[in-house]
Amino acid sequence: LIEIHADGSYLRAMVLMQERPSGMFSYTIATRGFVEVEGTTLRVVPTEGTETMTDPDSPSDSYTDQPTDLSPDEYQWSVSGDPLLLNGEFGVVDFVPST
């Protein structure tokens, strides 16, 4: 989920969850920063962020709100019909404005 604001700032949440026999594994990354647009490239530039992991198979390896990698991510954007499409490292996703 990326929430882009009119002033160019953004909030992003990435969540991975997996049900396991021992319980729910979860890994989350939350960042905030600013967005740069150059041609058809949309760059998400984090200025702060944290990550949290809960591993029921290895509770001692779990952690909360640790600093995360602040490397920028790039997407190629295009418009096809109505939605804005963002093509990045994990494939193409529709960008849907919040209501």
Image (cartoon, rainbow, N blue to C red):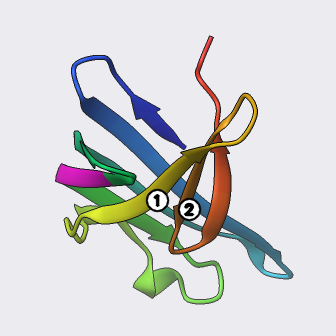
Side (left or right) of 60 relative to 99: left
Where residue 43 appears, as percent x and y from the top left, is: 29, 54
Give the Cα distance between marks 2 and 1.
5 Å
Kind of residue sitting beneath label 1:
Gln
In the rendering, which numbered label is found on residue 63?
A: none
Q: State the residue at coordinates (22%, 19%).
A: 7
Q: Amino acid at mark 2?
A: Asn
Instruction: Give the residue number, with chain letter if any, for mark 1.
Output: 76
Of marks 2 and 1, which one's residue comes earlier in the chain?
1
**Magenta stretch?**
43-47
Instruction: Name the residue at the right extreme.
Output: 21
**Viewer-closest of 98 and 15:** 98
Do the residues bearing badges 2 and 1 touch, measured as CB atoms within 8 Å?
yes
**Which corner quadrant holds the N terminus?**
top right
Q: Which residue is mark 2?
A: 87
Look at the picture and state if 41 lies above or below 36.
below
Residue at left 56%, top 47%? 78
Q: Is residue 17 left or right of residue 35?
A: right
